[in-house]
Amino acid sequence: MALHPKVIDLTLDRVWRLLAAVDNPQDRLPPVIHVAGTNGKGSTQAMIRAGLEAGGAKVHAYTSPHLARFHERIRIAGDLITEDALTDVLDRCYQANGPDPITYFEITTVAGLLAFAETKADYTLLEVGLGGRLDATNVIADPVITIITPVDLDHQQFLGDTLGAIAGEKAGIIKRGIPCVVGPQHEESMDVIEARAAALGAPLLAYGQQWHVSTKRDRLVYQDERGLLDLPMPNLLGPHQVLNAGAAIAALRALGCDEAACEAAVSTAYWPARMEKLTQGRLVDFAAPAEVWLDGGHNPAAGKMLARTLKEQPNRPTHLICGMLKTKDVGGYLAELAQVAESLTAVSIPGEAATLTALETANEARKVNLPATEADDIWAALKGIIETTPNARILICGSLYLAGHVMRENKV
């Protein structure tokens, strides 16, 4: 962090410099699947990985941010990077960089690429950190496929304040002649993505055009020009996961995978803190018989999908515990959740300088007519809810950083 520039300026200059200093690992990777988008990147990547691994493939995977441990960001041929391997690649990158400025994300991304280049695998899954065009992961000249999940408003201070501008940044991962899978989009976003793909001669595999996905009688139905698949519903909860599954299946089909791989993608993928019901741990035991759920979505589109998911759950009083960052649209996130939750208990996010105070989050909840109180920490928030509603469904939400704190607190 001592090397971190005082201002984050989205540029690839520092990344290219360090990549050259460590012998350009980006040119020595197994075939790359590059994923960008506002929401659904991690879930879509997890489903693709599950599908590929079910067929016997060894898969590297890079994602961010981490929840409980940094090692979650770098998965080497199926396994989280070891402490020794992580220390080694970080040390080598730090030494190669010298005293020059570089961001935390840039140097750790280069370390991940270096680790991937030095271990054999069949595929490399790369998730964009922020945007796409100038993201540190956008250094792959010829991925086998690119994917753009739904684009929505988030990180406007870096990416622009319109859907078109943000879509333009996400579309920056599209490469000349390389197929691009596109999830459901607003019309404004789709226009930008289509224009970029046309300019580069990149074939699009777009939702509602080249592929379709829906549900029927508690089954997932996927269809493209190769035919129809009748599959189980995704084990990741929520209507948005059906759409993410569709994008994952479209990518797997484009890579030549069979129906078994597609079924494994939807039925075996695991991605924590995405409408996840916690089933064991200290917090779970403390709150019993109440249910404890965890979700890391943090923008208005995520709030909307979360509200839809809650509506589909069995009838049970829902109470939120929420902590958010100052950079987020708190009112937009809470607007639809206010229609399905009975109360919100606000907390600040421990260890995060950019956290909103509990009072600030509670005041935003009150603005959307969601009854709110404040608590000093997660434990106090749980205690306040279970004292009045012991059978509650408690959803801890608002930030991946809060989700990571909860996962650490919940460990036995």
Image (spheres, rainbow, N blue to C red):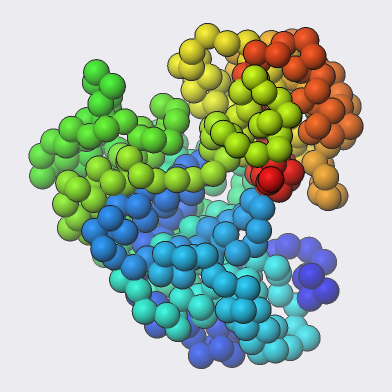
Q: Look at the picture and state if 196 lies above or below 124.
A: above
Quarter location, residue 232: top left
Residue lying at 57% horizontally and 72% vertically, measured from the top left = 82
Residue 5 appears at what percent x and percent y?
Answer: 78, 70
**Which image quarter is the C terminus in?**
top right
How far from the left and from the top, in percent, is residue 218? 28, 22
In this rendering, would 139 be left or right of 380?
A: left
Q: Is residue 365 visible?
A: no
> Which residue shows up at 44% across the image and 40% down it?
150
Can residue 227 be seen from the camera position used here? yes
Q: Position of residue 272 (x, y in %)?
A: 54, 44
Quarter of the picture containing the N terminus is bottom right
Q: Is residue 55 above or below residue 83?
A: above
- In the image, taking residue 100 as reference, residue 270 lies left or right, namely left
Nearest to the observer: residue 138 or residue 288: 288
The residue lying toward the viewer, choosing from 408 and 362, is 408
Position of 57 relative to 299 (above/below): below
Q: Quadrant of residue 153?
A: top right
Q: Quadrant of residue 119?
A: bottom left
